[in-house]
Each structure stands twice: as C-alpha cells, then as structure tokens.
C-alpha cells in the first residue's frame, strides 16, 4: 500500500506519474482519493459519437471521490481515473479525469498489485486486460 499526498498547485498527473515511475508501479488500484482540484478537465464518453465530451473547470472543487487504476498502455504508465467533485454550490459533477491541478491538497491510497494490467486497443476505447488474457 502506498500513501501519496500531492500539494497545493502541483500538477496532479505529473506527480502521480513521477511517483509511479520512481516506485516502478505499473499495475495498481487507486482505492481512495480526496482533497481539492482546480483547473481540471473531466469527460463523459459519448458512445454514439465514440468520443469524449470534455469540460474544463477553473475554480476549486472539493474532490469527494477518486478511483481508478494504473496500467501499461503502449509500454507507458497510464492512469485511468474517475472522479466525483462538488463546487461551491454543493452540486456534484463527475467523469473521467483528464488533467488537474491540486488546490490545497490531495490524498491518495494506492494498492500495488501483482497482476500486470495492460490497455489494448479496442473497438471504441482501450479495454483493460491482464497478462495472459486472450
């Protein structure tokens, strides 16, 4: 188990990738993530258009929940994360997290696993597979 705190104004994905590379994490489950994000992009995959509809939010939002995984995609470390966030109006938004900057702090609990997770090209997206799966 790894605990990772990311501090104010740090780029969320930059730090997550640097720590993953340093710790040689190629397969993991993000069990929990809380804190605050700003300057973030989240998306919803429109199955009819076969593409993400992405929205950008500049103001700080409370990070209520962050879950996902870390796998390999094209031999590179690739986080796949989903979030639920609340703004100052207390309304909740969520979706696939594409980019974010930390506001105040983010605290993550990461479970490193022994199964090698790999993203392979699929019909519309890259489904998660594990080493040995056909």
Image (cartoon, helix red, strand yellow):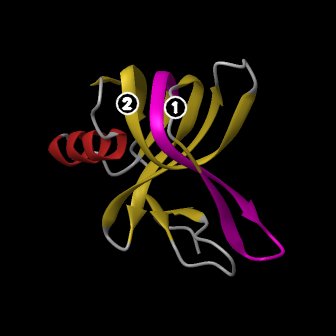
Query: Which quadrant: the C terminus?
Result: bottom right
Image marks 1 and 2: residues in contact by CB distance under 8 Å:
no
102 lies above or below 3: below
Residue 123 coordinates in the image, percent (x, y): 68, 81
Would residue 50 appear left or right of 79 to someone viewing this image?
right
- Membership of 35 in magenta stretch: yes
123 lies above or below 40: below
Residue drawn at 40 percent across, 30 percent down = 110
Q: Earlier in the sequence, mark 1 or mark 2?
A: 1
| Mark 2, residue position | 102
Residue 91 coordinates in the image, percent (x, y): 76, 24
Task: Mark yes or no: residue 116 visible.
Answer: no
Q: Say what secondary structure mark 1 lies in.
A: loop
Q: Say what secondary structure mark 2 lies in.
A: strand
Gap in Å between the C-alphas at discs 1 and 2? 11 Å
| Mark 1, residue position | 59
Q: Give the range drawn in magenta.
A: 32-55
Residue 104 coordinates in the image, percent (x, y): 36, 18
Residue drawn at 77 percent across, 66 percent down = 46
Please, which residue is most extreme toward the right here? 48
The one nearer the camera, 51 or 109, is 51
């Amino acid at each position: 188990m790894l605990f990772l705190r990311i501090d104010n104004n740090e780029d969320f994905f930059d730090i997550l990738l640097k720590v993953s590379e340093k710790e040689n994490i190629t397969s993991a489950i993000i069990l929990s993530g809380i804190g605050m994000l700003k300057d973030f992009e989240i998306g919803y995959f429109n199955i009819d258009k076969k593409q993400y509809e992405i929205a950008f939010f500049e103001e700080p939002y409370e990070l209520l929940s962050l879950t996902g995984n870390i796998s390999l995609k094209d031999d590179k470390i690739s986080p796949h994360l989903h979030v639920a966030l609340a703004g100052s109006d207390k309304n909740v938004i969520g979706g696939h997290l594409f980019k974010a900057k930390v506001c105040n702090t983010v605290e993550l609990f990461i479970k490193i696993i022994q199964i090698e997770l790999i993203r392979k090209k699929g019909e519309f997206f890259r489904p998660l597979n594990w080493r040995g799966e056909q």
